Image: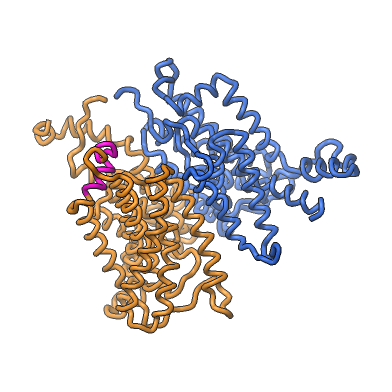
Chain colours: A blue, B orange
Amino acid sequence: MDLALVLSTLDATIRLSTPLLLASLAGLYSERSGVFDIGLEGKMLMAAFAAGAAAAVFDSVWIGLFAGIMVSLATAGLQGAAAITLKGNQLIAGVAINMLAAGLTTFLGIQWFAQGGRTPQLAAGERFTEITLPFADELQGIPVIGQIYHDLISGHNLLVYIAFLAVPITWFVLYRTRFGLRLRAVGENPKAVDTAGISVIRLRYQAVLITGLLCGFAGAFFSIAQGSGFGNNMTAGKGFIALAALIFAKWKPVPVMLTCLLFGFLDALQIRLQGQSILGVQIPVQAIQALPYVLTVVLLAGFIGKAVGPKAGGVPYTKER
Amino acid sequence: MSALRPLPRWADILLLPLINLVLAFVVSGLVVLAIGQNPLAALEAIVGGAFGNGYNIGYTLYYSTNFIFTGLAVAVAAHAGLFNIGGNGQAYIAGLGVILVVLPLQFLPWWVTFPIAVVAGAAVGGLWAFIPGWLQAKRGSHVVITTIMFNFIAAAIMVYMVVNVLKPAGVLAPESAMIAAEGRMPKFGTFIPWFKNTDVNFTLLLALACLVGAYVLIWHTRFGYQMRALGHNPTASTYAGISNSRTIMIVMTLSGALAGMVAVNQIVGVQYRLVLDYVADAGFVGIAVALMGRNHPVGILFAALLFGALYQGGNELQYVIPGLSKEMVVVIQALVILFTGAMEGMFRPGLQRAFMLFGGSAARREA
């Protein structure tokens, strides 16, 4: 393999891991606060649809992004109301959100745009296009480093940079701010947080809304950055790979990034390997597609390390007992 | 907690689900209204599409057959405190077992192949749920996460198997060979012309038998008691000498076996071959059915009929009112899950207060 091929595979890796990273970090906030979220997929799908629809109708990528985030926030709010205020089953709330998103986006898409569920094709100004970083073209001539800078680091759309910027920000928020300390505490021992005079409910709502915000970015990535318009079930289970990545990374921001890059790489590899064979053996693409899920199951079972989630996860907080 | 008394039984199992269902319909109706269509016309189209004539009822019953199986799968696990979200994957991969035993035996009469297909479907579906159960019992992995992952792993395996192994040479579509006419489960329409050539077949009787079997198992056997004890209080059941890990593994296997019956219905009763994605999310409908039916076989029967009617009615909806697609049913179903499963806290306290105020003698005598 020459450098150009390696670079183009890695380039695809970065592109494919972006929505995983955004969604996985989204889930991190919610789950660290003690609210299980298997509805990442649904929130992304809602956001993808809203972003695609709004960008097409208002001819603006920014209105698209804004709409995606707003719809994702509202969905997260609904999920929060069920899981936090009404003390409902968080897992069932997630299932309901996923199903609602699958039904509503197709239903409204067919009704509004009459294109079998797709939103209209977006023009150049209505979607996020590649950004060339400063000096990328000038430095391209320098072997290796210049090429890496030009091919790999430069030339992605805005949301890719936001996703990777969200990693250090999340790390800082989680480990270096008062909010982060409380967030981690509320996922482990809400009673202690409550005793310290801090509202568990409020903290969990804040966490769930941050989840909604990041899912909004992740969903928008599908319809107005990677693609140009929304298509039926566009997120195609990526929300569950993101969930797997979150568990695989043991709910920590930097490992989340590395895991998402790994899963993104597997995805890129799987596309590259379609119909090809390595050393005479044809590897079924389905095996590579299933690998993230298999790895997560194996890790969860404690065969390679151990993934233990936040202790208070999944349990609604009740003040008086 | 404040001194709210529990609801009377009939309110708990009938009134509350009904309120939630009505609310789900009202909210979906508002969505239909918001996009400028008439929700009452839509409801009429759905009801007509589900019950209008023998043809409609036949398809309603066909959908209900699948939903009874997946609803029971969720309910049986729920009694032991387990949330089996992997009904889809279990039903899907069970098809592999069914097609692999049925194809070699296809020229035998259906009453020979059918029981074998049932055993094969139950074994493979059960195995696909046993592994998450075993991982939960012995390794402490969360059964919900594992079953989600297993849904995707099953999908990958099935695509590989259908495209690379089961697809006969010369066939373009990704599907297995057809089962010969002898090996097919007869449809109702063969005996009762009123049902026309609809997909409802005698697997429905198996579904009804499973309902009865589940009832006996859960409430009238020693094992049923063990699983309910586990579901109510795992610590107490341990002290009572019940092996929780054994119970978890058996319950998950049973749950997966029930989900696997969808494969029997689809392959031996309806499509006569293995096609991709034949489960069509019936596993997830099962969650709504179990929640709506309060995990009781009688409730599940009615809930499965309801959702069968909704799915069949939804199919007809798009022909009656252009622009309204069958996905409206998915919205209703999601709202039912949301209201009955996750937002129960919305009505229960209010209803409890209402019963305490107006409930009269019955509630007072209990107190």
Write down the region rendered in magenta: B225-237
What percent of the width, then of the height, locates residue A3? 81, 50
What percent of the width, then of the height, locates residue B189? 31, 77
Left or right: residue B167 versus residue B248 is right
Magenta span dominant secondary structure: helix
Residue B260's image quarter? Answer: bottom left
Residue at 44% in and 72% down: B100
Left or right: residue B233 versus residue B96 is left
Residue at 51% in and 55% down: B152
Is any atom of residue B268 visible in this view? yes
Looking at the picture, does residue B122 appear above or below residue A321?
below
In terms of depth relative to the viewer, which is nearer, B319 or A30?
Answer: A30
Left or right: residue A251 versus residue B242 is right
Looking at the picture, does residue B187 appear above or below residue A123?
below
Q: Which quadrant of the rendered structure holds the C terminus of chain B?
A: top left
In terms of depth relative to the viewer, which is nearer, A55 or A37?
Answer: A37
What percent of the width, then of the height, locates residue A191? 39, 22
Looking at the picture, does residue A71 appear above or below residue A192?
below
Is B264 one of the magenta-colored residues? no
Left or right: residue A219 versus residue B264 is right
Residue at 35% in and 43% down: B341
Q: Which quadrant of the rendered structure holds the N terminus of chain B?
A: top left
In terms of depth relative to the viewer, which is nearer, B11 or B56?
Answer: B11
Looking at the picture, does residue B267 appear above or below residue B147?
below
What percent of the width, then of the height, locates residue A175? 58, 24
In terms of depth relative to the viewer, which is nearer, A182 or A143?
Answer: A143
